[in-house]
Structure formats: C-alpha cells, structure tokens
Image (spheres, rainbow, N blue to C red):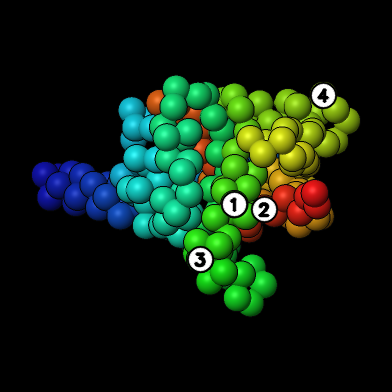
Amino acid sequence: MKKLLLLVITSLYCSVLFAQGPLVSVNPKAIGPLRVMAGDGMLPANDIIKNIALSKELSTFYNFINKTNLAATFQSRGPITMFVPANDAFLNLPDGKLDSLMKPAYVWELTRLISYHSIPGRFKAKDIEKEINKNKGTATFTTLTGNKLTAKIDANRNIVLIDENGGESIISRFDIEQNNGMLHVVNKVLQPKVKTI
C-alpha cells in the first residue's frame, strides 16, 4: 500500500511539474488569447523607457527612441499608452526604409514615427474594446503627433490598429503595466500620413 501511495504522489508531482506551460488564458468572450506579462524582465515599477530597454524583442524601437529626443517624454509622469512594434515588425517596412530612418537627416520623420505609436492616457485592452463597442465597431484615437489611429476587433477577436495609410497591426501582447502608462506590443509598424507643408 505504501508503494502504491508513493507511486501516486510521485506521478502527481511529475504531472504538475511538467504540465506547466506559458500562462495563456483563453476566454471566448475576451479579446484574443490573453498574454499579459512580457516575460522578459519588464516591471510595473519601471517607466516605459526602462522597460523597453529590458526587452530584447523591442530593441529596434528602443534604438529609434535613442536617436530622437523622445526619451524624456516617455519617462514623464504621463500617463501614456504606447503600441511598441516588435523587432520583426520592422522587416515589413519598404526596402531601405529602416536604414534611412537611422540617418541624422531623417530624425524628424523618425520622431513622428515613434510618436505616432503613442496616445495620451492609460488604455488597457478592455478600455480600447469599450471605445470600439461604444462607437459601433471602430474607435479613433489621437496620437502624440496629432494624427489619428483607428482600432477595431477582427473576426479572431484581436484588436487591430489601422494607421492613416490603411496599414493594419495586431496587438500581440497587451496590458503590460508601466509606472507611467500602459504598453502593448504590436506586430507591424504603424505609419502616419505624410503631411505636406
């Protein structure tokens, strides 16, 4: 009997030990699969800049912020909600665009691009969804550049951001708390419409 009990306890322990995977809760009524924590060292006590610096997945965006004078803006009290493209998102830019943006002559274009990924206020995914539902399927947000960004929910229950050129980006990770706002990771770079003077 002791051997049987020991066998049962050992098998239960092993099943619990090896069954632990990533924390992803799926609720058919919720927005997509919930992936709240970044899992890469980000801490809610840090500001947006400190947390982006900690994430290897967001290093391209972090390098771009350092090329502009926006670090102080994103370290302010805020609150600011930022939609940060993952490194892979920059592969979808037209050929040569990434290299051009790193040149000093393009600092204003880069500043607009970074600012376009940010909106004033603290918006969790549920807040964005509420705005979408309140406005019958789409919500419009004004970014720090003064340009518009539209949000909708697609057939797979993902929140999709639509830039002024019609480009679409899905929020792949959301509700990453910052001490001065909220951070969401997106899978495409959002591009504002070019303003002619």
Give the CA distance from mark 1 to mark 2: 16 Å
Residue farthest left in this picture: 2
Q: CA distance from mark 4 to mark 1?
A: 35 Å
In the picture of the structure, the residue carrying the numbered disc 1 is: 108
Discs 4, 2 touching: Cβ within 8 Å:
no
Q: Quick one: label 3 or label 1, which is nearer the N terminus?
A: 3
Mark 2 and mark 3 lie on one chain; the one further toward the N terminus is: 3
Q: Which mark is residue 134?
A: 4
Q: Which residue lies at the image location 51% right of the left edge and 66% below the top edge?
A: 103
Q: Is residue 125 above or below residue 114?
A: above
Q: Position of residue 25 (x, y in %)?
A: 53, 41
Q: Residues within 10 Å of mark 4 (few under 14, many from 20)?
A: few
Q: Secondary structure at mark 4?
A: helix
The location of residue 16, given as percent across then percent down, is: 30, 47
Q: Is residue 23 visible?
A: no
* Residue named by callout 2: 190
Q: CA distance from mark 4 to mark 2?
A: 24 Å
Gap between marks 4 and 3 measured at Cα: 42 Å
Q: Which is more foreground, mark 4 or mark 2?
A: 2
Q: Crowdedness of circle 1 by 10 Å Cα count: few (<14), some, many (20+)?
A: few
Tag 3 residue:
103
Type of amino acid at the residue the image marks with label 3: Lys
Q: Are marks 4 and 1 in contact (CB under 8 Å)?
A: no
